[in-house]
Image (cartoon, rainbow, N blue to C red):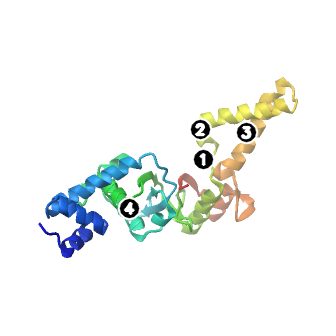
Amino acid sequence: MAITAQDVNKLRQMTGAGMMDCKKALTEAEGDFEKAIDILRKKGQKVSASRADRETKEGVVVTHVSADGTKGTILSLTCETDFVAKNEEFGAFANTLLNLAVENGAASKEAIMALPIEGITVAEKIVEMTGKIGEKIDVSHFEIVSAEAVVPYIHSNGKLGVLVGLTNTNGADVEEAGKDVAMQIAAMNPVAVDKDGVDASVIEREIEVGKEQARAEGKPEEMLEKIALGKLNKFYKENTLLSQQFVKDSSKTIAQYLDGVSKGLTVAAFKRVSIG
């Protein structure tokens, strides 16, 4: 049967696929739109498979905070090129996935992938988008923070985002303080809120590095442990959030800054998501 320009345009509107791809799919499906959509989807699967080993170093980070301000969600949707990352449709898709996750109470990337969207799963939709765009697409990060007050921050390039959860707010307006701390996290990339949150393997590695440095400096063997522990304390000061110098006022630590905003105010948790 003859495939008209109107048919091709209709399928393009339905799928967003390219004109020639739509024409070929309709011809192969003998004008059956549902079959043509399946053909395009299968093409997407082939594209996705062929690009499975490609790295996704571009993309966008999006955040959502509940109406009561106590639960924040952050998601990164990644792709291969900056050109695609800056595409309006790509950004809109990232927000659609985030909102879908929030509405359905998804707690993991795997849960998001199984959610229904437009009659298929999110995983299938991503394959579809891969076929349409011609680049590998992936939900690379999905994190949740719950606290008395959760404040989001997205860096100007759209590829770095932070959620910071504050506790002991005592009814104070902590939005500005939360933004300040979120920007600190974005800039300084702390490994944990405080030393109690540092992974044991990181502590062990820092102690071993400290010992080796002291040994290389010719320090006595019986002094190595003490020297290494001193270096570990310096590591805590530089790499745990509450002990870090506040970038806006180096005379204060983050803990001191927050306590000055409202007595006892502190950070319960944070998540930092960066692309590239």
Residue under label 2, please give it: 199
Outermost residue toward the top in this view: 222
Q: Residue at x 48, y 66 (%)?
A: 83
* Residue type, mark 3 in image: Leu
How dense is the environment of label 1, judged by Cα within 10 Å: few (below 14), some, or many (20 and up)? some
Which badge, 1 or 4, comes first in the chain's sequence? 4
* Residue type, mark 1 in image: Ala
Q: CA distance from mark 1 to mark 2?
A: 9 Å
137 sits to left or right of 257: left
Is 206 in front, or is 12?
A: 12
Which badge, 1 or 2, comes first in the chain's sequence? 1
Q: CA distance from mark 3 to mark 1?
A: 14 Å
Q: CA distance from mark 3 to mark 2?
A: 13 Å
Which badge, 3 or 4, comes first in the chain's sequence? 4
Q: How many marks?
A: 4
Q: In the figure, 109 relative to 35: above or below?
A: above
**Quadrant (top left/top right/bottom left/bottom right) for the N terminus:** bottom left
Q: Are marks 3 and 1 in contact (CB under 8 Å)?
A: no
Q: Are marks 1 and 4 in contact (CB under 8 Å)?
A: no
Residue under label 4, please give it: 133
